[in-house]
Amino acid sequence: GKGTFRHDYLDTRKQVAASHVVVLEGQNKALLSVLLHVEDRRIAGIETLVQRITPESRFQPTELDKPVRGMDDPVPAGKRMKRKDLISTALTYTEGLRVGSFIDANTPFAPGTYRVENGMITAGPGCGRADCGLYAQNIILHPGIIASVAAVDEEKGVVLLWMNFGLTGNSYGEGNALVTFEAFKVWGGQIHSINAFFKGLQMATARFWPSTDPVKF
């Protein structure tokens, strides 16, 4: 069935149509990241990541009945950025995870930036903990993190990254790593909002489609 949450990211330059969307399996929600790779106006490849939410799931989403704040807003006049600058800004987030500090990585969060992960606010306004600030939170070192550019919606100013967080002890289960499609709203040289759908998968999980945009990791 059709849920009520959906964000689209259209990369017209690379011919990729991507979405974060909630679908229903009976009464249960499934968090679906889907990318359609298009060639000659035909679907040439389908890339998906699915995280199922049941009543027994440890984390229960609270933010899937409305869009992520700011994600679909038009980029303010004069604040639009070039594709390469959108990507390099988003990748400072990956670098912050790698070194364990968004401060050391010079990740440019705008005031009021917040992050939604699998339908829950985990940083920024609405997080509900004492360490909600994106610069204040303790971050696990992710020395083996791998990033790939999945899509760049240059009109909306959104970069969608695929990331495999790599070895972090048994944080995500023995032999597992967190794998995510994570969207970053970027304009004016800053990250303004973040939405991630993720799942614990085997650490060796790789992305089938290598990024054609340069990634330094």
Image (cartoon, rainbow, N blue to C red):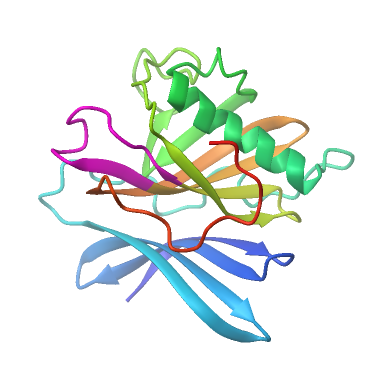
Looking at the magenta stretch, what is its main secondary structure? loop
Quadrant of the rendered structure where residue 164 is?
top left
Let me know if residue 166 is in the magenta part.
Answer: yes
Tell me: residue 144, above or below residue 100: below
Residue visible at 60% across and 23% down?
A: 107
Q: Quadrant of the N terminus?
A: bottom left
Q: Residue furthest left?
A: 56
Q: Residue at x 78, y 33 (%)?
A: 188
Q: Is residue 117 magenta?
A: no
- Relative to 149, 117 lies left or right: left
For residue 204, side relative to residue 82 (left or right):
left
Depth order, front residue of 1/106: 106
Q: Residue at x 75, y 50 (%)?
A: 74
- Name the residue nearer the viewer: 179 or 153: 179
User: Which residue range is magenta in the image?
Assistant: 163-179
- Residue 91: percent from left, percent from top: 59, 35
